[in-house]
Amino acid sequence: HRVILDPLIAEGLLEHVLPDWHYAPHHVHAVYPSNRFIPLKVRRFVAGFADHLAAMGAFIDDKKACTSKETAPA
């Protein structure tokens, strides 16, 4: 959200009135079947979306995965 809000604050269109208050971090998960063949369009979408989030300053952790018997990482 800072990537979106910082320019507006700098232009004087928004004012940061609670500087000690912060949003809780948001998590986004790409969930798809765990098989050997992942369609190219799915791989491209996930990679493109991860690039978009990284460009916005988001932390990307692509090492976490789970199986159907496990709970998704938090």
Image: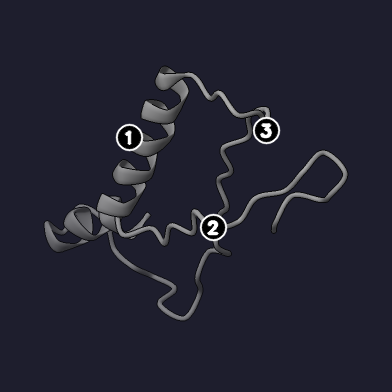
The residue drawn where x is 38% and y is 44% is: 50
The residue drawn where x is 63% and y is 34% is: 31
Please give the residue where the numbered disc 1 appears in the rendered image. Answer: 48
User: CB under 8 Å between callouts 2 and 3?
Assistant: no
Q: Earlier in the sequence, mark 2 or mark 1?
A: 1
Name the residue type under label 2: Lys
Indicate the quadrant containing the N terminus: top left, top right, bottom left or bottom right: bottom left
The residue drawn where x is 65% and y is 50% is: 65
Above or below residue 62? Residue 48 is: above
Q: Earlier in the sequence, mark 3 or mark 1?
A: 3
x%, y% of residue 59? 42, 62
Name the residue type under label 1: Gly
Secondary structure, mark 3, is loop
Above or below residue 49? Residue 19 is: below
Is 63 or 4 nearer to us in this picture? 63
Name the residue type under label 3: Ser
Please give the residue where the numbered disc 3 appears in the rendered image. Answer: 34
Q: Is residue 27 left or right of residue 4?
A: right
Mark 2–mark 1 distance (CA, rounded to whole Å): 17 Å
Q: Is residue 24 left or right of residue 22?
A: right
x%, y% of residue 61? 49, 59
Please give the residue where the numbered disc 2 appears in the rendered image. Answer: 63
Secondary structure, mark 1, is helix
Identity of the residue furthest to the left in this view: 11
Mark 3–mark 1 distance (CA, rounded to whole Å): 20 Å
